[in-house]
């Protein structure tokens, strides 16, 4: 693939955006007169721990920022609920006159650091605010075959059926004196006739390229009769500061939405590497807008510096 990198289009070092601490996992909603990009940012509580919540930025057709909303989009969960301590990420999807948001809610644990599940919220004002569906519980959570860490939902409608790509945890690696606990998670997919009740087969669809590989944030597009899946992957430990073990972008393709062939070499990732993402490229999001295919992604330190953009020139 040949990419034309546009660089860091949401730069948290700029004076305009320096009040934000992170802009993780950008996800798009195409509106009539603008592109709305949702992302997850962080806020430190009085106890010194962070919570994550959803914000958005609007762009015009020339990629100029025309609006920014940083609070009040989706409320966090109440005490003890699955999204009590944060929502990261969110995947918006137009369904009729509504915008549905498939959220990943997380909450702190005692024996390990975190547990996650997938929630659903709906908007009637083009994604400016969302109301959660149900009484505060998750839409898709751990079960008999997916025991932990269900999240990162990406949903599209193909052939009059909803498809969800998501991650599920397989196990935690036991903490040692030199390494903290590490979670291992894989990409799976599910189907639904209504976008609410999902059928899962708990099958990892992407082959590993490294031992105990962690796979995250799948995103899918249909182009020229083929389905293209982008994601990020990393080593299970020593990934935060070691660029040889941190997140990189992976790629797989399918002709039938059932069987996926991985081929990271097609990405030509050198086209995406700049100073702000020299050590890490993560949380990709592929989408179509203005008759072109674009890729949003985060860089070093999991989105601490904002997110960048690349235009796909050719497959």
Image (cartoon, grey):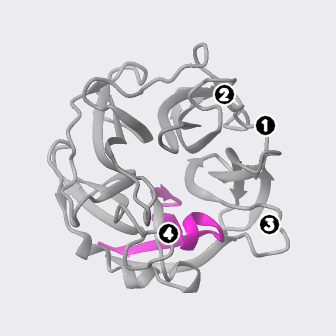
**Contact, mark 3 vs mark 1 (Cβ under 8 Å):** no
Along the viewing direction, whichever of 78 and 189 lies nearer the viewer: 78
Residue that badge 4 annotates: 240
Tag 2's secondary structure? loop
User: Residue 153: x and y, percent?
Assistant: 43, 40
Q: Residues within 10 Å of mark 4 (few under 14, many from 20)?
A: some
Discs 3/2, front: 2
Q: State how far apart marks 3 and 1 are (Cα).
A: 18 Å
Which badge, 1 or 2, is on the more N-terminal residue?
Answer: 1
Tag 3's secondary structure? loop
Q: Residues within 10 Å of mark 2 (few under 14, many from 20)?
A: some
Along the viewing direction, whichever of 177 and 256 lies nearer the viewer: 177
Residue that badge 1 annotates: 72
Main secondary structure type of the part rendered in magenta: strand
As drawn, the residue found furthest toward the top would be: 135
| 215 magenta-colored | no
Discs 2/4, front: 4
Q: Residues within 10 Å of mark 1 (few under 14, many from 20)?
A: few
Q: State how far apart marks 1 and 2 are (Cα).
A: 13 Å
**Contact, mark 3 vs mark 2 (Cβ under 8 Å):** no
| 305 magenta-colored | yes
Q: Is residue 37 visible?
A: no
* Disc number placed over residue 77 in the picture, else none: 2
Magenta stretch, residue numbers? 287-315
Q: Is residue 277 visible?
A: yes
Relative to 289, is 165 above or below?
above
Tag 4's secondary structure? loop
């Amino acid at each position: 693939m040949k990419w034309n990198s546009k660089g860091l289009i949401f730069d948290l070092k700029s004076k305009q955006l320096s009040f934000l601490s992170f802009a993780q996992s950008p996800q798009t909603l195409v509106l009539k007169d603008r592109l709305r990009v949702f992302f997850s940012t962080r806020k430190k509580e009085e106890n010194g721990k962070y919570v994550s919540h959803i914000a958005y930025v609007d762009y015009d057709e020339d990629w100029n920022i025309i609006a920014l909303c940083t609070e009040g989009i989706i409320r966090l969960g109440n005490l003890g609920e699955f999204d009590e301590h944060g929502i990261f990420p969110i995947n918006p999807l137009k369904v009729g006159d509504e915008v549905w948001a498939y959220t990943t809610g997380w909450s702190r644990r005692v024996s390990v650091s975190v547990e996650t599940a997938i929630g659903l919220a709906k908007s009637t004002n083009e994604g400016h605010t969302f109301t959660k569906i149900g009484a505060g519980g998750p839409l898709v959570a751990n079960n008999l075959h997916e025991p932990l860490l269900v999240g990162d939902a990406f949903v599209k409608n193909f052939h009059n059926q909803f498809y969800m790509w998501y991650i599920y945890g397989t196990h935690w690696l036991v903490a040692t004196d030199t390494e903290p606990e590490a979670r291992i998670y894989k990409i799976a997919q599910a189907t639904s006739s209504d976008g609410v009740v999902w059928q899962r087969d708990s099958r990892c669809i992407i082959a590993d390229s490294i031992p105990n590989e962690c796979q995250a944030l799948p995103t899918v597009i249909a182009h020229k009769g083929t389905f293209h899946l982008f994601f990020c992957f990393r080593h299970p430990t020593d990934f935060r500061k070691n660029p040889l073990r941190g997140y990189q972008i992976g790629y797989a393709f399918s002709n039938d939405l059932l069987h996926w062939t991985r081929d990271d070499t097609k990405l030509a990732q050198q086209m995406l590497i700049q100073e702000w993402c020299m050590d890490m490229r993560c949380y990709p999001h592929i989408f179509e807008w203005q008759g072109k295919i674009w890729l949003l992604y985060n860089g070093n330190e999991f989105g601490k510096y904002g997110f960048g953009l690349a235009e796909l020139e050719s497959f």
